[in-house]
Image: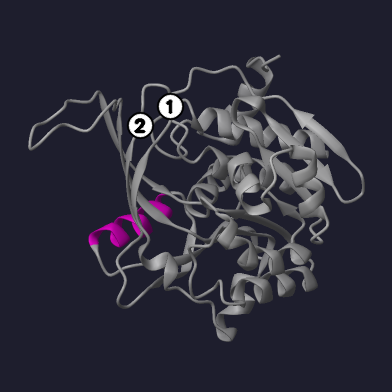
Amino acid sequence: MTFDYTSMGFYTFDALCHPVTDLPPGGSTFFVEDFALAVSGAAGSASIVAAKHGLSVKAVGGVGHDLMGDWVLRRLGDFNIDSENMQRCEGFTTSSSIVTTRPNGMRPALHKRGATAGFYVDDAAMDRVLDTKILHVGGVGLMDAMDKGRNAEMLAAARAKGCTTTLDVFASTAEDFPLIQPLLPHTDYFMPSEEEAMALSGRTDFEDIASFLLDQGVGAVILTLGRDGTMYRGSDGTKINMPSYQIDVVCTCGCGDCFNAGFATGLHLGKPLEDCLQFGQASSAQNATGLGSQAGVESLEATLKFMETTPARC
């Protein structure tokens, strides 16, 4: 297989500022300390972190014929990410966000859905997209054209080819579950946040949520729990609880997406499951130390050093 990691789905242009405690009244101006641009999204952040960790990465998604799309494609190129299957979608602008990062790291955002809703992988492109060891699908619920059955076909074809499949969502609600349910039998690792998992399942107890999702046929459920770490539950009965790292949080934008790429890095390196989860936690934690998705992630060597030197939360 040509690529180590293919990240398909939600790519967005983000403009972030920090710290923001309120929006200025009327036409006035508040001054901030920091401002950044980033490629983000459930597929975008994951693709860049995987590339920073040394994986060969293919990006699959959509952008518009606009300056934001130009910048997204240029930025992917900065990390040597293959963008052959990034489509310029007619009639769509690039998915874009304005992120107002709070002093505590929370990140209320204003988002325009854009071209994530318009891209589509046709039969002619499928073999190129699936020429990969790991297929990650991120952003189900925003991918209007792909959510109408194509994501399930892609995941099923990936599994048939021997690819490892991972799945994530974005700000899901209960109404999104019919889009996600058909994907789960073709997914090795489903990695929603605690809020997304509760919304999708209609449940609040984490063990109950994991059991519900495993009953849908997924190989394993990984719930990302913010400062409370990560909870892994496998269809084979494996149970792992992994603490988070002690850090000073700047911005939590993209933390779950960076976890996904860190976990994939561990899989790519052939590490034990516990190490894969630690790679995910370390990638997420480093991300939170900077402004903008992937800002705090530098390289595989830096991530390994972070894991060795940064204490875990008790």
Local SS, label 2: loop
Residue at (32% x, 78% y) in the render: 90
Foreground residue among 115 and 204: 204
Q: CA distance from mark 2 to mark 1?
A: 6 Å
Q: How are the colours assigned in the image? A: one colour
Q: Residue at x 60, y 71 (%)?
A: 129
On screen, residue 209 above or below 28: below
Of the pair 189 and 80, the residue shown nearer to us: 189
On the question of residue 1 being in view, the answer is no
- In the rendered image, residue 313, in percent from the top left (x then y), is placed at 67, 16
> Residue 91, can we see it?
yes
Query: Residue 114 falls in which quadrant of the image?
Result: bottom left
Circle on res. 105: 1
What residue span does the magenta drawing correspond to?
67-78
Per the rendering, the mark at residue 178 is none
**Are the two marked residues, 2 and 1, in contact with CB atoms closer than 8 angstroms?**
yes
- The crowd level at tag 2 (other Cα within 10 Å; few <14, some 14-19, many 20+) is many
Residue 230 left/right relative to 193: right
Q: Position of residue 55 (x, y in %)?
A: 61, 49
The majority secondary structure of the magenta stretch comes to helix
* Quadrant the N terminus occupies: bottom right
The residue that mark 2 highlights is: 101
Quarter of the figure with residue 15 = top left
- The single residue placed furthest to the left in the displayed view is 27
Q: Position of residue 216 (x, y in %)?
A: 79, 61
Q: From this viewpoint, which residue is outermost toward the right? A: 236
Quadrant where the C terminus lies?
A: top right
Q: Amino acid at mark 1?
A: Gly
